[in-house]
Image (tube, grey):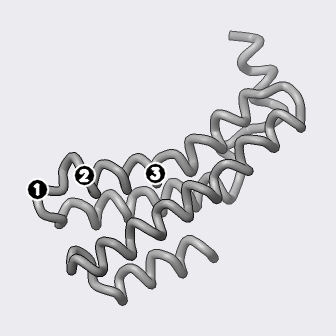
Amino acid sequence: MYLKEKKMAKHNFRELKIWHLGIGFCKEILHQTKSFPKSETYGLISQINRACISIPSNIAEGSSRESNKEFDHFPDISPGSCFEVETQIEIAISLNYIEPIIAENLKINFRN
C-alpha cells in the first residue's frame, strides 16, 4: 500500500482538471448512447463507450508511473481516443442517433 501511495503522490490523477473533464465527458456520452437503437449495442454503442472511457482511464493509468516521461506518455494517448469519439459521434449524427446540436455541445464542453 505504501508504494502505491508514494507513486500517487507524484501524479495524483484526481487533482488533474483534464481527468475531471474526461469523466464528465464520459458521463455525457454514456447518457447519450442509452438512446441509441438496441441493434447498436455491440456496434457503435460499445465502440463509442469504450473510446470515451479510455480518455480518463489513460490519464489515471499514467499517474501510476514513476517517471515524468512514463507519465507523459499516457495523457498523450488520450487525444487519439478523443478523435475516435468525435468520429463515432459524426457517424451517430449521420444515422440520426444523436441530434447535431447535442453532439456539438458535447464537443464544445469537452474542449473547454
As drawn, 9 above or below 42? above
As drawn, 26 above or below 101? above
Q: Residue furthest left?
A: 38
Q: CA distance from mark 3 to mark 1?
A: 19 Å
At horizontal 73% and vertical 38% (from top left) the residue drawn is: 12
Residue type, label 2:
Gly
Name the foreground residue: 64 vs 80.
80
The residue at which mark 2 appears reads as 43
Which quadrant is the N terminus positioned in? top right
Q: Position of residue 89 (x, y in %)?
A: 38, 71
Q: Position of residue 73 (x, y in %)?
A: 78, 41
Label 2 neighbourhood size at 10 Å, few (<14), some (14-19), many (20+)? few
Q: What secondary structure is found at the residue carrying circle 1? A: helix
Mark seen at residue 39: 1
Residue type, label 1:
Ser
Whichever of labels 3 and 1 marks the residue nearer the N terminus, that label is 1
As drawn, 55 above or below 82? above
At horizontal 56% and vertical 71% (from top left) the residue drawn is: 110
Q: What secondary structure is found at the residue carrying circle 3? A: helix
Picture quadrant of residue 29: bottom left
Q: Position of residue 78 (x, y in %)?
A: 63, 52
Mark seen at residue 5: none
Q: Residue furthest right?
A: 68
The residue at which mark 3 appears reads as 51
